[in-house]
Amino acid sequence: MTEVMEKPQQDARAATQDFDVLIVGAGISGIGSAYHLKTQNPDKTFAILEAKENIGGTWDTHKYPGVRSDSDLYTFGYRFKPWVGPPIATAEEIRKYLRDVLAENDLDQAIRFGTLITRCSWSTADKRWTVETKRADGSAGPTYRATFLWMCQGYYDHHNPYLPDWAGMADYKGQLIHAQKWDDSVDYSGKDVVVIGSGATAATVIPVLADKAKHVTMLQRSPTYFYCYPNRSDLADRLREIGVDEDTVHRCVRLDYLHNLKMLDRRAREEPDLVFDELKELIRQYAGPDFEFEPHFTPRYRPWQQRLAFIPDGDMFERIRDGKVTAITDTIDHFTADGIKLASGDELKADIVMAATGFNLLMMGGIEFEVDGKVVDWSEKATYRGMMFEGVPNMVWVFGYFRAAWTLRVDLLGDFVCRMLRHMDEKGAQEVNIVIPPALSAEPLMPWIEDDNFNPSYLVRDMDKLPKRLGDQPEWRHTQDYWREAVDIPAIDLEGAEFSYS
């Protein structure tokens, strides 16, 4: 049954296949969007196009040891599907959750696996998108046509992770592997391992490596904020103990997490030093009362200016306390045959080096887009609320949250798209376009997000590839503020000046 759920039978009978809606991607965004479309707009025909051979998106791409969520599943999961496990879940637990959503809602047969999109072309004359594809073996796949595109393929390159070109890499005689390219054949038992990076991936993989490795060194360019807490929800446990049903447990615990996240986000801006002191106290519960935070665990930015890395049960800091893991803050001068020479002059010996250095942004999965024969340059496009784009008709892009669970926006945008599709039907419209109102025509195009709002390296590094916000207008940006959008997006006036129908 699992194999059927992972890879439904393909229907290749038609060379060209027509649908009302095409959803691109069968990860957590695409599956959630498909649920909303099927339940809220049951009259619409749709298919889910997935380049991989399995569901899960990022949870299928990443296979490094211990891979897990860094958001709680009460908010990272869907609002419509109760989560019943520990708040932080493994990749396999998340994939099972997604398989259950597919099975319970009869969505699996909508997925076209092994379908790599090469080009999407909009025709104003036909009021349709034409989507060209190829198969995994490179042969031409079916052509799809649809009135509406729902882009849920994510925002980074699943094949080419970010790996800096360090000097001397060719001289290194050990194993050098990027976390995104992890190979299960790598044997790290009894080995000296260096993990380059200090974000969520590093914090996830290091405790698992440390259980078998001789020693693990976390080599970081700059420190990260960590949030340590037991991997449980006391509220969920108590509600279950007194007999509350799972739907209510999920709703209550989800609201509790959202409230706590909102308070943390506000306090990180208003009283960052106090928040850091509280984070330190949580870490000391696992690392010991005398744990030193200088210099390796004192970041140069305020909390939440980059993503706060959640460490369930403080596992990485327990390994540091036990001497299995060492943190070093330095930069790489060059690789040697035996390891890494640091800018400080120190040398790290390593049998294995794992680069947990992040990924490369990839707008729209690298798919070529055309509107009436003109290639779309996303870096020149103004974005409406980080989901639609001026001059690109009948398309929504799902880009979630970083300071809150990604999936919260999947649910919000699911409601919005379904409402917009119904509105178009009521108007008899076949096309909706985003236009810049004349009153805002003089507003400058600005980078996707401000540095002082959210500035992780992977975003700053490729900011020029992303669409633009329009001045400081809140409607013309991705605010990264779930609590504001939870009010604003349901209240969008679909007859507002931004929307043009035909």
Image (cartoon, grey):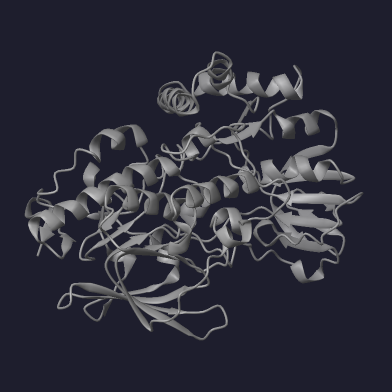
Count of labels shown?
0
Q: Position of residue 500 (x, y in %)?
A: 11, 59
Left or right? Give the position of 158 relative to 452: right
In this view, the residue farthest toward the top is 242
The image quadrant of residue 229 is: top right
Left or right? Give the position of 181 relative to 155: right
- Residue 221 in sight: no
At horizontal 35% and vertical 37% (from top left) the residue drawn is: 481
- Residue 469 in sight: yes
Q: In this view of the protein, which residue sits in the foreground, 393 or 459? A: 393
In this view, the residue farthest toward the right is 190
Q: Position of residue 12 (x, y in %)?
A: 45, 79
Q: In this view of the protein, which residue sits in the foreground, 239 or 269? A: 239
Q: Position of residue 373 (x, y in %)?
A: 24, 81
In this view, the residue farthest toward the bottom is 139
Left or right? Give the position of 452 relative to 359: left
Q: Position of residue 198 (x, y in %)?
A: 65, 43
At horizontal 42% and vertical 81% (from top left) the residue drawn is: 13
Left or right? Give the position of 50 relative to 230: left
Is 127 situated above or below 404? Answer: below
Q: Quadrant of the N terminus?
A: bottom right
Is 454 situated above or below 342? Answer: above
